Amino acid sequence: MSNETIALLSARRSVAARQMQAPAPSDEELNTLLTLAARVPDHGKLVPWRFIVFSGEARVKAGEIIAAAFAADNPEADEKRLAAERERLTGAPLVVAVVSRATPHPKIPEWEQVLSAGAVCMNLVVAANAMGFATSWITEWYAYDRRVLEALGLAANERIAGFVHIGTASETPPDRPRPELSAIVTRFDEQGR
Ligand SMILES: Cc1cc2nc3c(=O)[nH]c(=O)nc-3n(C[C@H](O)[C@H](O)[C@H](O)COP(=O)(O)O)c2cc1C
């Protein structure tokens, strides 16, 4: 691994969508990003994931779908709250939904297919940061709402692995605490313990 890659992985952190602005990746850059994101380990070569790209006014349309589901469940919600729901995908200039389409398979556990979708998300995040963009990998309640998912075009067996928000950082937040290795690492020893 090159020092540049180590430096990128050492410094990368999420930037909230509200801290992003234009420009988004160009169409050509987006093609590169999605090509790289799809370049992940995939047991059985099942390609158990796909992408949905949200840009421009389509982000507004998606926000209307999200707000409609929210309003149906929260009839008391005021206009300010509904506006916040409508703006769910408009903070960043580009949002890529990584859709997991894991299904039961005779040889490949579903768990491994889901993990592969997580790898897609992280590859997308790392590649976008390598291009100089900021990212935020989030889900939020609407990633689990079947009405919203259906309206966004997901089939019944499909789930959101992440909405990856991509843009240019208008501010860079400080890093967050990272786990101490001593809290998460043990060594299996030769006595089998
Ligand atoms: C699958 C997944 C879903 C997430 N969903 C949310 C979310 O809904 N809301 C949120 O505030 N953060 C969510 N996060 C966490 C954000 O990505 C968070 O900003 C991140 O942990 C920051 O770490 P980083 O700086 O290393 O990127 C999610 C993370 C993952 C991996």
Image (spheres, rainbow, N blue to C red):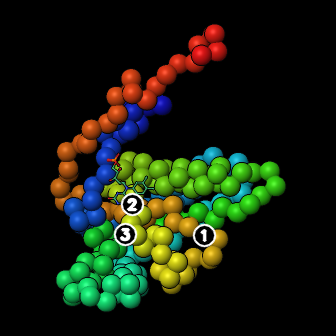
Q: Quadrant of residue 96?
A: bottom left
* Residue 128 place in picture, x, y as percent: 40, 54
Please tell me which of labels 1 and 2 falls first in the chain.
2
Please tell me which of labels 2 and 3 falls first in the chain.
3
Residue assigned mark 3: 94
Amino acid on which the number 3 mark rests in the picture: Leu
Q: Nearer the viewer, mark 1 or mark 3?
A: 1
Please tell me which of labels 1 and 3 falls first in the chain.
3
* Residue 166 place in picture, x, y as percent: 35, 62
The relative height of residue 140 versus residue 132 in the rendered view (above or below) is below
Q: Which mark is residue 158?
A: 1
Residue assigned mark 2: 138
- Other residues around mark 2 within 10 Å, as few (<14) / some (14–19) / many (≥20): some
Tag 2–tag 3 contact (CB < 8 Å): no
Looking at this view, is 51 or 159 the one in front? Answer: 159
Q: Quadrant of residue 64?
A: bottom left
